[in-house]
Image (spheres, rainbow, N blue to C red):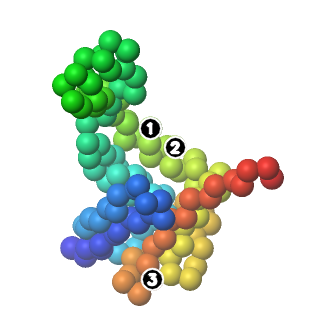
């Protein structure tokens, strides 16, 4: 079975770099399936690198922690985990709404049913479009 290595990179410094290998029955698939698989993989890898924190402390808590020599936000459990199918639908709507671009090599993929051929010579690039402030 052919495999393809996909690496997600971000230009935002705080965003982690993800890399994984997909096993496909074919190295040709639609943009819809590629977006679906990439979204599902991101959901599988979704786990905070560090515990989530409650961003508020009372005056009393600050004073008590200061006496101990260290003020740190208390850890709390992550209570909302994204629903993978909802995230897939959101990603597909974002693609059709032109909120991100998908490039396969030098070719822009414009339709969900357009076939993409996975190849090391034609890297896949997802570009998130962000509106500029004021216009």
Looking at the rendering, which quadrant does residue 63 occupy?
Answer: top left
Where is residue 104 shown, x and y percent of the image? 50, 76
Q: Nearer the viewer, residue 48 or 44?
A: 48
The residue positioned 64% from the left and 55% from the top of the image is 130
- Return the disc, 2 or 3, that comes first in the chain's sequence: 2
Q: Is residue 91 visible?
A: yes
The residue positioned 48% from the left and 65% from the top of the image is 11
Label 2's element? helix
Where is residue 70 shown, x and y percent of the image? 24, 31
- Residue position marked by numbered label 2 in the rendering: 90
Residue 76: give its label: none
- Residue position marked by numbered label 1 in the rendering: 86
Residue 122: give its label: 3
Q: Are marks 1 and 2 in contact (CB under 8 Å)?
A: yes
Q: Is residue 115 visible?
A: no
Q: In the displayed structure, would residue 33 be above or below residue 125?
A: above
Instruction: Give me the C-alpha separation between circle 2 and circle 3.
Output: 26 Å
- Return the disc, 3 or 1, that comes first in the chain's sequence: 1
Where is residue 44 shown, x and y percent of the image? 28, 47
């Amino acid at each position: 079975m052919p495999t393809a290595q996909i690496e997600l990179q971000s230009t935002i410094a705080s965003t982690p770099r993800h890399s994984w290998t997909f096993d496909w029955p074919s190295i040709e698939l639609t943009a819809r399936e590629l977006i679906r698989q990439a979204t599902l993989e991101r959901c599988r890898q979704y786990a905070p690198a560090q515990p989530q924190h409650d961003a508020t402390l009372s005056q009393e808590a600050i004073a008590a922690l200061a006496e101990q020599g260290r003020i740190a936000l208390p850890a709390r459990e992550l209570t909302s985990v994204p629903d993978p199918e909802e995230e897939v639908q959101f990603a597909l709507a974002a693609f059709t709404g032109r909120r991100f671009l998908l490039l396969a090599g030098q070719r822009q993929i414009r339709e969900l049913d357009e076939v993409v051929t996975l190849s090391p010579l034609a890297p896949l690039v997802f570009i998130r479009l962000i509106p500029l402030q004021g216009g």
